[in-house]
Image: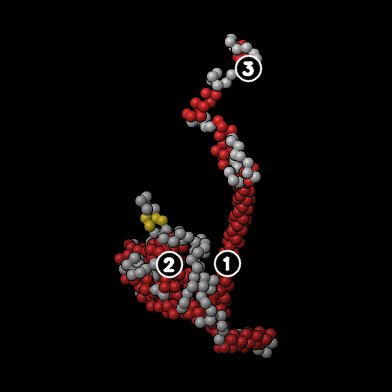
Amino acid sequence: MASLSLGPNLSRKKGAARAGLVERKNLITVCRFSVKTLIDRSCFETIDDTSPEFVNFVCILEQILSHRLKGQVTWFGYESPRSFWDYIRVACSKVPHSCISSIENMENVRTSRAKGRAWIRVALMEKRLSEYISTALKDYRTTRRFYGEGSVVLGEEAGLLADMLIGLNAIDFSFCLKGETLDGSCPAVIDYTPYLKFTQSVDSISSDEEEMRTLGSSGSEASTPETGGSTLLLDQSSWFNKCRRVEQKYRVALEQKGYLEELVRLREAQLSESVSQNKALLQRLAEADLSHKLEKEQLEYIVLELQDQLKSFQSLDQLSADMTLSQTSLDPVHTQDLEPKPGRSRWFSEGKEDTPSLRGLCGSLTSVASYKSLASLKSPECLVSPSTEMTSPGLTPS
């Protein structure tokens, strides 16, 4: 019984290993085709982010680097998904003059997937993508820690991958690492349409025409009574082989039709997502425009207020200057300066005597001599009023 149970398990494991081998070979083959088409396209036009050959190459490379990538086991025992950038960041840390640190410090690239895509573009512009891949594959311990059994980077096809990427050093790439193109939420999907061949050889066309002719002739012969016996003698094996070939061609056409329909559905989903993102961006642009207009109006209002305040300050300064000028004109010190000087007045030009001013007669109130002179003028010895003269004894009116 144990041997019977081991038989299906062994066959299942062999089938899984065979399927994994076919998958790895297909990825490497498609990658070689994409590199060749990318080099051919670079001879006629510049390669940028919008080139379909470059987009398909990046999708293939992401699929290869993400093939059977292990998840990160958290402290609670759950396995969180990883990106190939986590492996490249650790495995390529010893590359001299690498761009790993500069990509880590980029502000507009935040997610792990976006950093991995930015690394691919920077490595292509530096013409060192093959060097990064070969250095990462040489670190076998790190590669085993990040990838599981049956992955491309752990298989024999890994050396072919590093060799075929050397041809990309002949292309001068130019990419823009700004914007939201690197943070795409949609997964990388490979487009196999450029690598499919829908041509039909001349031999197959002739065989199809012969089969149709045989079927028509057999039908016509079956309809005539003279050849009714001959139709019973037809070889059944030939009919079986013809039907089998027709069925095989029908299945191939049906598979191609299903693939194309799936590709159309994927493109429609991407188109709807792009339309929704475009609407969101237009809404954000309208909101930003409205906020800018409001800020502009507020700034204009503030400028007008500041101009009014400046005008009021200038009027106040003018008023204070006028008041200061009027005070200085009323000050006695300045009035003395404004008095006519000797030799300049019209009266002095005519030769008249100097008329003493009131201040010259009275003197300064602060000086002691002038104060004594005023006291002497007020004493009764020098000044005699008419009333005292009339009433004083001993004096008779004349």
Mark whose residue sits in front, 3 or 2: 3
Report the quarter where the C terminus lies. top right
Q: Residue at x 48, y 66 (%)?
A: 177
Is there CB contact under 8 Å for labels 1 and 2? no
Mark whose residue sits in front, 3 or 1: 3
Mark whose residue sits in front, 1 or 2: 2
Is there CB contact under 8 Å for labels 3 and 1? no
- Label 3, on which residue? 386
Q: Nearer the viewer, residue 352 or 246?
A: 352
Give the percent coordinates (x, y) of residue 210. 60, 88
Comes first in the chain, label 3 or label 1: 1
* Residue lying furthest right: 224
- In the rendered image, the vertical position of residue 232 relative to residue 352, given as above or below: below
For label 3, count other residues whose C-alpha is less than 10 Å away and answer few (under 14), some (14-19) or many (20+).
few
Q: Residue at x 48, y 29 (%)?
A: 369
Mark 1 belongs to which amino acid? Answer: Arg
Dot label at residue 267: 1
* Residue lying furthest bottom: 226
Give the percent coordinates (x, y) of residue 246. 57, 79
**Left or right for 207, reference 124:** right
For label 1, count other residues whose C-alpha is less than 10 Å away and answer few (under 14), some (14-19) or many (20+).
few
Q: Nearer the viewer, residue 79 or 185?
A: 185
Label 3 sits on a secondary structure element that is helix
Dot label at residue 27: none
Dot label at residue 119: 2
